[in-house]
Image: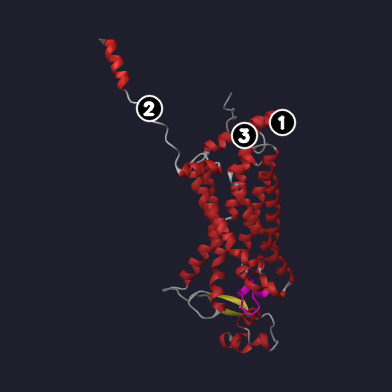
Amino acid sequence: MLSSRNSSSSSTSKPSPPPSKPSMLHRIRNAIGFNRSYNLALWFIFSGALFGFTLARFSYLNFRGIFCPKKSSGGNECYYYLNFPRYHVGIILHLATILPACLLVLFQFTPVIRQKFLLFHRINGYTVLLLFALSTAGALMIARHTFGGGLDTQSAVGFLALLTVGSFIISIINIKRLQIEQHRAWMLRGWFYAGCIITTRIIMIIAAMTISSPPDGGAYYTARPCDQLLFIHKTQNETLTYYPTCESYFNGSNSNHEAIVRATMNSTKASEITAALGVSFGMALWLALAIHAVGVEIYLHITPKEAERLRNVSFARQMEAGMKNSWNGGLAVQRLGDAETWVPREH
């Protein structure tokens, strides 16, 4: 009786359902090389922002036609870019190198390329770093007159250059020691720092609109050289109409005279609009850099499993290469701080 019941129940039991097919999202995630969906989401957001920002500025390579057209005031900086060789070379060098670097670096952060095309990853990586180094040199050349060139802007540009280049140097040292998780961390830091220029533009525009709105609308002022104001307004009569104190510049008694310019976006004067953007830029760059510096540390802090996985990969490759101190190679924290000795997973 018991056996008949068992046979009856087994005969009526339902077959196990076939395994479900992976969703479209999972197929895309796996094709790109990610193991977790949140990594794909973050990659899409940050890579998409960098890709869009870079494409939108590729037209600037048409320097005389779009970036600083001859028949336009072109803003404050174009006066220096068009009339002084140092700044002309600096801006051309910066644009011609940073734009292709920002496109090529997207391949570096695509996992499937790192996994299946390692040689391309290495060659492309060194190409990107070379382009970025040249672009940094160009940025430092023009920092004196970028968006007004105040000390806040110059110090922010210099500090950003120090952070990015320093991060990339540390990253190279680590990959030479096959310390892959540290290479990843410092590359992420360097490009997060560099990406703050996108956030800077957003903050700058918001700040410029804020200082142009009540109750403080039009209450911010800055100084601009009269030769720059003449470049913007084109004629002596128009320049003197807006800035009569520039009379000393035009009569030759003070060729370095500067006039006080109101900083507001609610104006028909190009000089006042560019002044509003200029007084906001330095603050925006410092704030954006702080946001990105904190953001990348948060990301690294919430992805310890990936760091641990790469630490074990680093250990295996260091052992294969016969490297000494393969447990704590490169610039691992155990070599520099008081962290506990790291033990490989298989041990």
Q: Secondary structure at mark 2?
A: loop
Residue position marked by numbered label 3 in the rendering: 334
Q: CA distance from mark 3 to mark 1?
A: 21 Å
- In primary-sequence order, the first of circles 3 and 2 is 2
Residue 306: image location, x then y, percent: 54, 37
Q: Is residue 311 visible?
A: yes
In the rendered image, residue 244 lying in the magenta stretch gets the answer no
Which residue, given by chain and number where applicable, does mark 2 sit on? 16
Please state which of residues 244 and 76 is positioned toward the viewer in this rendering: 76
16 in relation to 193, above or below: above
**Which residue is at a point 70% across and 59% down the rendered structure image?**
137
The residue lying at 48 percent from left, 44 percent from top is 38
Is 69 magenta? The answer is yes
Please state the extent of the stretch shown in magenta in the rendering: 67-79
Quarter where residue 116 is shown: top right
Give the x, y percent position of residue 190.
Answer: 61, 50
Q: Pick the quarter of the image with the N terminus.
A: top left
- The residue under label 1 is 321
**Residue nearest the viewer, comparing 253 with 118:** 118
